[in-house]
Amino acid sequence: MNTAKLGDLVKIQTGKLDANASVSDGDYPFFTCSKAALRIDNYSYECECVLVAGNGDLNVKYYDGKFDAYQRTYIIESDDKNILDVKYLYYFMETYIHKLREQSIGGVIKYIKLGNLTDAKIPLPDLKTQKKIVAVLDKAQMLIVKRKAAISRLDELLQSVFLDMFGDPVSNERKWEKELFGTCLLKIESGWSPRCETFPASKGEWGVLKLSAVTKGVYIPGENKELLKDLEPKQDIVVNKGDLLFIRKNTLDLVGTSAFVFDTPDFLMMPDTIFRFVLADDRRLNKLFLWQLFNNIRFKKEVQKLAGGSAGSMPNISKQKLKNIGLIIPDISLQNQYANFVMKQEKQKEIMKKSLRELEENFQSLLYRGFKGKL
């Protein structure tokens, strides 16, 4: 298969905005170096393009429409779509991102230079073949999207059943007994945020969770950074099966999110932006019930009102303020009944996640074969 230098086929520019230019409910996507797009009220670009995060968590996105971008995000457009299909370029960059990570330079926050992109050699079959490869990969990716959506629906079901069983935890129309959270706690434990590598911990190596391990309301252990080899790990903040984690510091829409640890690899530690709740008596309060209570939309807004911080800093919730929030305490038998339902859903989710991993492995295989001319 013929190859070409990417710089000869595309136009590359970068965004102009600071990362903090986002707004919660903006009309347009705002692409930064994070994997998920943020939102913004105005747009500076309208095109079909590939977006490459230029520093930090190097990643690739495809977009066609109006958007804005962070100043370290590369915006790549095809000079001639009859020669280079943009979606084909996106899938190529998905295969090339590991090369960019190898080429990245810098200290704590790694970054790439423009030349790392322009010098890339891209396989360049005719347009018909490009579109054939795109069609195969689109189909495989759609299966992944659908499976992820099915998993998300299981998470939504947990909240739906929570409301059916316990009602609104803020208005408390069911008249459940209420107590200050502090009376239910033995302690709230804090983590540690040392300097780390930019990549996840290898098997058997120590790592520190990133906030993204909890921000979705479910525990994602792969979201971590490997501890530097010259630092001594702290055994007392190791994440354990059965832990209930809570984000004490983040953006206003994410602070206060919690996640239950159904299972976890060894050697992962909490960062100092995450709390761990240790209950005084699990015969009084079930952690699975508490997890879903803290992630209930209405109750979470009450928790987020506790967040404070100086101008320009991320909102932060103190231990003392958390201890003073009131929460409903339904009958423990009902809490346990709900917890059993949660466990059944978790088993179903694990089956779906196994299927998702198989779909993702198949996609990676197709991706490799597509750019080796074997599809």
Image (tube, rainbow, N blue to C red):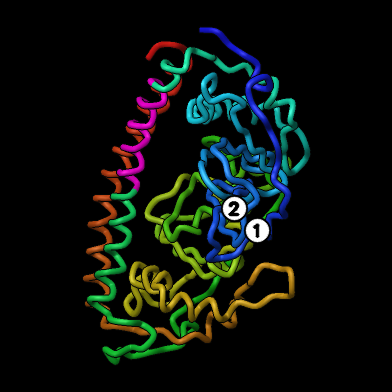
Give the amino acid at mark 1.
Trp
- Label 1 crowding class (10 Å Cα cut-off): few <14, some 14-19, many 20+? some
Of badges 2 and 1, nearer the viewer stands: 2
Residue 249 position within the rendered picture, expressed as x and y whole percent measured from the top left: 61, 67
Seen in the picture, residue 14 relative to 316 is either above or below; the reply is above
From which residue to which does the magenta span run? 132-148
Neighbourhood count class around disc 2 (C-alpha, 10 Å): few under 14, some 14–19, many 20 upward: many
Which residue is identified by label 1? 192
Mark 2, residue position: 30
Residue 369 visible in the current orientation: no
Residue 229: name its quadrant: top right
Among numbered discs 2 and 1, the one appearing first in the sequence: 2
User: Nearest the camera: 340 or 170?
Assistant: 170
Please identify the quadrant where the C terminus is shown.
top left
Name the residue nearer the viewer: 134 or 351.
134
Question: Which residue: 74% across, 26% down?
Answer: 115
Image coordinates of residue 117 in percent, x first then y, are 68, 27
Q: Position of residue 116 (x, y in %)?
A: 71, 26
Q: Amino acid at mark 2?
A: Phe
Q: Does residue 73 appear in this view?
A: yes
Residue placed most toward the observer, 203 or 233: 203
Residue 312 drawn at (x, y percent): 74, 69
Q: Residue at x 55, y 63 (%)?
A: 26
Instruction: Look at the numbered disc 2 and give the secondary structure of its residue.
Output: strand
Task: Place residue 131 in its image quadrant.
Answer: top left
